[in-house]
Amino acid sequence: MNKPAFSVCVYCGSRNGALPAYADVAQKVGTWIGQHSGQLVYGGGNNGLMGLVAQATADAGGRVVGIIPKALQTQENTRTACTELHVVDTMHERKRMMAERADVFLALPGGIGTFEEFFEVWTWRQLGYHDKPIGLLNTQGYYDGLLQFASHSVAQGFLNDWQMDLIRSGTEPKTLLQELVQAAGFAPAPKLAAL
Ligand code: AMP
């Protein structure tokens, strides 16, 4: 496998969620990454949307980097088939390594683990700890409530517009991925086989 063109760190649910659209979008994200010679960086598990995005990336010929804490290996059902699998000592180490290996971040529908990771890279960005693009995939309006709450926070003076501008939300995985990867300075091109 050749050197990847870019790395997308995906945060998403360790469950599938209630709608088939969530699994569908996870597969589309993985397929897009693989078809554009990209690399997925993710939590290293086989459960839920996490497992689906990894499998779709691999099926489309992309590299899969999984980073999982030792203590979560059983619970999260480690994907031993990762191109690169890192078993680390702590959750902090996992999140640091995922962030370091990423060119862009993308959150898909998920639960508190996903929220926490998304908010962490958003807060790190506002503090200037990194300048990598951050996306929120709002499949079936899953994150409408969160975005409305953020607008409420702006209206109430706890958040500024420039902080809102640090994240991009979208509903179409291909469009959002293209925008994020381009914003990180790459020109993603589909492999010939994907045309
Ligand atoms: P969830 O969105 O809750 O299904 O979790 C998705 C992933 O986020 C899982 O791999 C969790 O291990 C991970 N995660 C990362 N940070 C945390 C945290 N502080 N608490 C819970 N889960 C976390």
Image: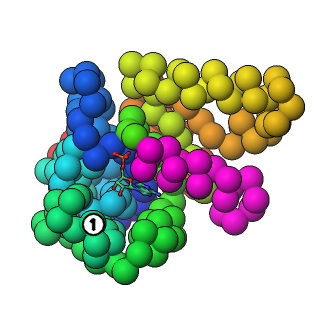
Rendered-image quadrant of the C terminus: top left
**Which of the two residues, 20 or 187, is positioned nearer the viewer here?**
20
Where in the figure is residue 68, as x and y percent of width and height? 31, 69
The quadrant the N terminus occupies is bottom left
| Image location of residue 91, percent across then percent down | 43, 69
Residue shown at the point (37%, 45%) measured from the top left: 12
Vertical arrangement, residue 78 with respect to residue 24, above or below: below
Residue 123 is one of the magenta-drawn residues: yes
Q: Percent from the top left, x then y, of residue 5?
A: 39, 61
Left or right, 53 with respect to 99, comes to: left
Helix, strand or loop for disc 1: helix
Depth check: give the residue in front, 75 or 95: 75
Q: Is residue 155 magenta?
A: no
Query: Could you tell me if residue 191 is visible in this image?
Result: no
Q: Which residues are magenta?
A: 112-131
Seen as rendered, the residue at the extreme right is 157
Q: Nearer the viewer, residue 142 or 40?
A: 142
Q: Is ligand 1 less than 8 Å from the beta carbon at label 1?
A: yes
